[in-house]
Amino acid sequence: MRLPLVLFLCLCAVHGAAALSHSGFIVDLFCWDKAGHVAIDGADLDTNPEAHSVHCMVDIADCRANGFGLLEKKSDGSYDLKYKLDSAGNTKALEMLDALKAAEGGGRKNVLVHAEGTVGSDGETLSISSIMAGTGEEGHEEPEAGEVMHMGFLVDNFCWDKPGHVAIDGADLDTAPEDHSVHCMADIQDCRDNGFSLLEKKSDGTFMQKYVFDAAGNTKALALLDDLKAKEGADRKNVVVTAMGSVGSDGKTLSLSSLTAAKTSSGAGAETGVGVLTKGLTITRAEVDRDDDEIRVTIKSETNSWIAFGVTTSGGGMSGGGNGADIIVCTTEGAKRYWVTKRAKPTGGGAGRNARGTV
């Protein structure tokens, strides 16, 4: 029997602090606070946090109840606690870990996550808007000590420096960098020769230049663009990339260690992103189209699985923190709409207005 896909996108607004992202190993604070940072399952969290199991974090009551933190690798190769999650973040972390256990078993280790959110005034409490686990496979990339990770639109500096940040291909890079084409960046000589940078979305919805690549980074960017052109054509737009590297003393020049492009399709007014949710389950396209007022998600699954995306204004999670969540369930019988107030298989759904789905 094929199970339905539950579409549930959690959009959480956080105000009053600058947004950031962090990739690192997640640990429960009960184990971290033990002597020598040696976890109950024997993992040395100082030197080998990848050995810490999901079972230890979610099945042992003290571990489950005492919150979670994210680690950062130091220059000597050992690890330190970078952020503690707040109460809502601990709930999100538990939901993620419970899902990992259900999908892969409590023996799953190597729980490297990517979290986005804001840091409190104490400099160490992280209020997360999202948290996602990597595949757990050996070799999964993690920023080295002192590196940053940034996901954003790639643009060429020649176009960015034009009046009003309007590119040669007509894309308004201030407001719609998703319209900037691979052709413009890779085929026009001035664009190709003048380097590349990454954008960041500001609180007013417009974009600013966040990082400028050094010479080696520009070479990597050109190789990525040439590869995109060969595989998808010069008309490919919506070039969202994930970059890792170290920032220079000017606070702006990024020396890349890796650069990868999201596998997204073009579309005016779309914000996109991709990610591995868990082993065998991957978002290959996620678009919020402001022009058409639509959310479009494509999920590749190697097994029959549940996956939840939704809209909520409070609490997050499948139930909207108990306040309810409006979800669309996509099944082989078509799309149905449900109002969900607790974590359970939805029942009693009706026809979803403007909802479409295929499995």
Image: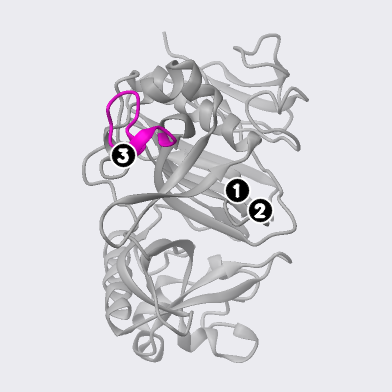
In-image side of 283 versus 225 (left or right): right
Marked residue nearer the N-terminal end (3 or 1)? 3
Is residue 263 inside the magenta stretch? no
Q: Answer above or below: position of 105 versus 149.
A: above
Q: CA distance from mark 2 to mark 1?
A: 5 Å
User: Which label number is shown at residue 300?
Assistant: none
Read off the residue under disc 1.
125
* Span of residues in magenta: 32-44
User: The residue under label 1 is which amino acid type?
Assistant: Thr
Q: What mark, if any, has residue 49 been given in the picture?
A: 3
Residue found 57% across the figure and 52% down from its top: 124
| Mark 3 or mark 2, earlier in chain | 3
User: Residue 224's spot in the image, x, y percent?
Assistant: 30, 68
Residue type at the position of mark 2: Gly
N-terminal label among 2 and 1: 2
Q: Residue furthest right?
A: 323
Is 347 or 20 nearer to us in this picture?
Answer: 20
